[in-house]
């Protein structure tokens, strides 16, 4: 396993700590006390207090005196990235067409650390309890798009992923051992798509394929999110075999558009 390089002399620790405070807030931790923030960031209470009140002054956070929560202003941090990316814009009409044909929600995501980050999302009906929009993050190992993206990593990159990832179960079906996840990634590489059945949330099944760049490497993944309404293994397999060609056609269209625009 490759060693993690120590911060260089250009590293600004205070900025890193401030960003850690922002990232401590997520779907499961939308409101936190000072003590909770300090615990999640491994900062002292005094240090966490300074960062929290600085963020309040800057408008990125609000507080009632006890609980702290992020404000919509933090979205500007993500939109600065998304607005500079051509791929989500190019993918949008292809995803809309796929969603319209299949009557299901579809998305595009990339890998960022141990999470996937949604770049685009077309909603139909809501079948997951957490709202999803561009910028939403989920642990990569529990999602179909995440497994497509993980399957494209080198062995060294996978070592780094498993060293950093928290393989906690989100449902009784979630794979939580490295061996089981790597076996699934081997299957994904062989078949060229991933299926995750109720590992992120009970009642949710999803199918994903890669979007390839001009060099043939995976640059993103797209999926279809399905209600886990089919109980029989044969019915589930038939559904997947029908949807995979549709997903691949959409992914190829996105890749062609990106190449023509010089965006991949």
Image (tube, helix red, strand yellow):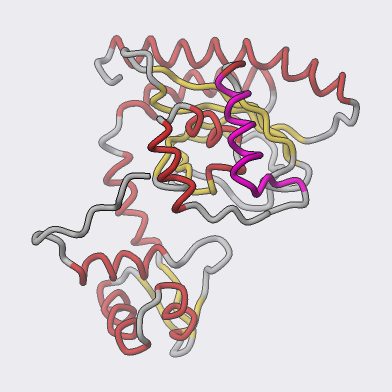
Please state if 213 lies on the left or on the right of 57 as rendered.
right
Which residue is depicted at the point 52% across and 27% down?
222
Q: Which corner quadrant holds the N terminus? A: top left
Which residue is depicted at the point 9% across and 59% down?
10
Which residue is depicted at the point 49% across and 49% down?
137
Secondary structure that dominates the magenta span: helix
Instruction: Please provide percent x and percent y for residue 162.
Output: 49, 47
Magenta stretch, residue numbers: 173-189
Which residue is depicted at the point 64% across and 47% down?
177
| Rendered image quadrant of residue 144 | top right
Front one among 49 and 156: 156
Q: Residue furthest left?
A: 9
Image vertical order of residue 258 relative to residue 56, above or below: above
Image vertical order of residue 161 relative to residue 71, above or below: above
Instruction: Please provide percent x and percent y for residue 66.
Output: 47, 88
Q: Residue furthest front?
A: 1
Image vertical order of residue 174 relative to residue 251, above or below: below
Magenta span contains residue 92:
no
Instruction: Please provide percent x and percent y for residue 71.
Output: 40, 67
Please state if 229 lies on the left or on the right of 185 as rendered.
right
Front one among 194 and 259: 194
Front one among 14 and 32: 14
Magenta span contains residue 175:
yes
Q: Which corner quadrant holds the C terminus? A: top left
């Amino acid at each position: 396993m490759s060693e993690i390089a120590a911060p260089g002399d250009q590293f600004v620790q205070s900025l890193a700590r401030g960003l850690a405070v922002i990232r401590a807030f997520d779907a499961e931790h939308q409101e936190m006390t000072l003590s909770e923030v300090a615990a999640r960031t491994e900062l002292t209470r005094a240090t966490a207090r300074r960062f929290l009140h600085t963020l309040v002054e800057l408008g990125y956070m609000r507080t009632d005196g006890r609980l702290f929560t992020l404000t919509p202003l933090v979205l500007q941090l993500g939109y600065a990235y998304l607005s500079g990316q051509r791929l989500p814009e190019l993918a949008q009409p292809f995803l809309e067409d796929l969603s319209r044909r299949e009557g299901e929600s579809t998305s595009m995501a990339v890998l960022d650390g141990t999470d996937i980050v949604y770049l685009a999302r077309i909603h139909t009906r809501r079948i997951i309890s957490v709202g999803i929009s561009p910028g939403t993050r989920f642990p990569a190992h529990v999602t179909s798009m995440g497994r497509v993206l993980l399957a494209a990593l080198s062995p060294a990159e996978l070592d780094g992923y498993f060293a950093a990832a928290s393989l906690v179960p989100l449902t009784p079906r979630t794979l939580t051992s490295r061996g089981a996840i790597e076996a699934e990634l081997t299957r994904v590489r062989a078949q060229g798509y991933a299926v995750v059945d109720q590992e992120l949330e009970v009642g949710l099944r999803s199918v994903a394929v890669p979007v390839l760049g001009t060099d043939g490497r995976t640059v993103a993944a797209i999926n279809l999110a399905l209600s886990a309404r089919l109980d029989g293994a044969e019915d589930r397999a038939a559904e997947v075999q029908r949807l995979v060609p549709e997903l691949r056609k959409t992914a190829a269209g996105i890749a062609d558009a990106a190449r023509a625009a010089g965006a991949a």
